Image (cartoon, helix red, strand yellow):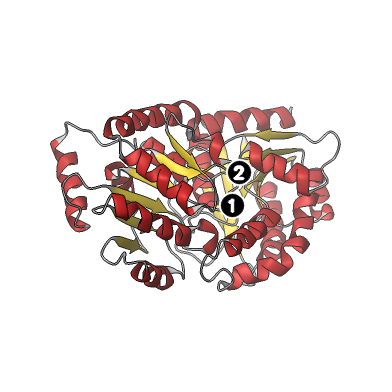
Amino acid sequence: MHVAMLSAEYPPRWGGMGSTVYHLSAALAEMGHTISIITRNGMNKPPKIDGVEVFTVPWKKIPMEFTRSYGKYALKKLKKINSVKSVDVVHLHCPMISWDKNQFDECKKTIAPVISSLHGSWLGERDGLFTASKYKESAVWANPNDLIMRFTAKRYAQFENIAINYSNICVSNSNATKEDFLKRYSPPNNWDCKVIHWGVDTEMFFPLRQDNEDDFILYSKVREKYNIQKNAHLLLAVGRLAARKGFGLLLQSFSKVKKKSPNSILVIVGRGNLRSRLLRQAKRLGLEGSVFIESSMKFDELALLYRVSDLVVYPSYYEGQGLIPLESMASGTPVATVNHGPLPEMVDSSVGSLFTMGDINSMSEVILSELNDKSKLLEKGRAGRNLVCKKFTFKKNANDFLNLYESIVN
């Protein structure tokens, strides 16, 4: 089968969407299928995968509006690819591509049926920013993309509404995302929307091997790097340094954690323009020397950090699904995250804990409760790894999507 995937993100332009498209295409190619990726230009060469060919197209570097220009050029490239080798299925990754009704009709009539993956909604993203503002996250509207989204999300949501009405099949990445679209948009009465949770790379993210000498050496190096004393706790938070991710609230909660667990260290890993603001906030809270923010980290280094951490904290105000908790669980590390949106679909008391979104006391109490029982942490870590290997792998994603591809082709 020849599958054309249209995704505005693809490595080396990483992100949740880029990661899932990369791994899904690799898994399908390994099964013997041909995958054509159409993504935005302007980055270094993508990694090579047998059976996967990557095409890049121009796009207007304008926040939000790039979804229209990228969509136009992607359709033009799709026609050329189809003229050389017939495409069986077109797989759109929304919302970072905006097609109108005529573009959907043209694709379905002249190229192939369309599956649209719903990674989240623009209106949900916008409301996540409003929620971050409500809980006084710093620089909520400092990012130009976020500021423009505040005023234009409603306009670009109309293209999401077109996608759910004119795709052959829609696939949401969580039940929460599906409900979000049902509540905010106008799907047809017979709307065919499946739910397929994205998986993570269980070969990159794996647990610390307790009896392995090399792992112990790496473990010791990490703890030495961050000056973590014996029996002290290492907390990890991963995600883009943006207001929506809730790191400001995390710092406030961590200041409460430090009162009862004074030697604890917090490491935040993520790119973004909030690093200096977050470090200043940490200093004001008396956390200087206890909070480290890593703006850039290789994947193998991040995977190691997951393995050696005691607990991963994920305080995001909005997610379509959220892959960080799964990466942590695959690494054998429990997760504390919000009891909101899609997160409870992946995290429960067997693999971590949930706290009330936006509640500093709830977050700090949950963190302390988890850290106070080392044996329970190990037990939850093992359960998390088992759960991910059973339900959240790219091999499972490939099989699930292949079944959908075949259903609309047949």
Residue under pointer 1:
318
Marks 1 and 2, how far apart at CA: 7 Å
**Residue positioned 45% across, 63% down in the render:** 44
Label 1 crowd bin: few (<14), some (14–19), many (20+), radius 10 Å = many
- The quarter of the rendered structure image containing the C terminus is top right
Name which residue type carries label 2: Gly
User: What is the quadrant of residue 287 in the picture?
Assistant: bottom left
Asked if the residue at tag 2 contacts the one at tag 1, i.e. Cβ–Cβ closer than 8 Å, the answer is yes
**Label located before the other in sequence (1 or 2):** 1
User: What is the quadrant of residue 389 in the picture?
Assistant: top left
Residue under pointer 2:
341
In this rendering, would 160 be left or right of 314? right
Q: What percent of the width, then of the height, locates residue 167?
A: 77, 43
Q: Nearer the viewer, residue 30 or 288?
A: 288
Q: Is residue 381 above or below residue 154?
A: above
- The quarter of the rendered structure image containing the N terminus is top right
Q: Is residue 243 above or below residue 49?
A: below
Element marked by disc 1: loop
Q: Nearer the viewer, residue 115 or 89?
A: 115
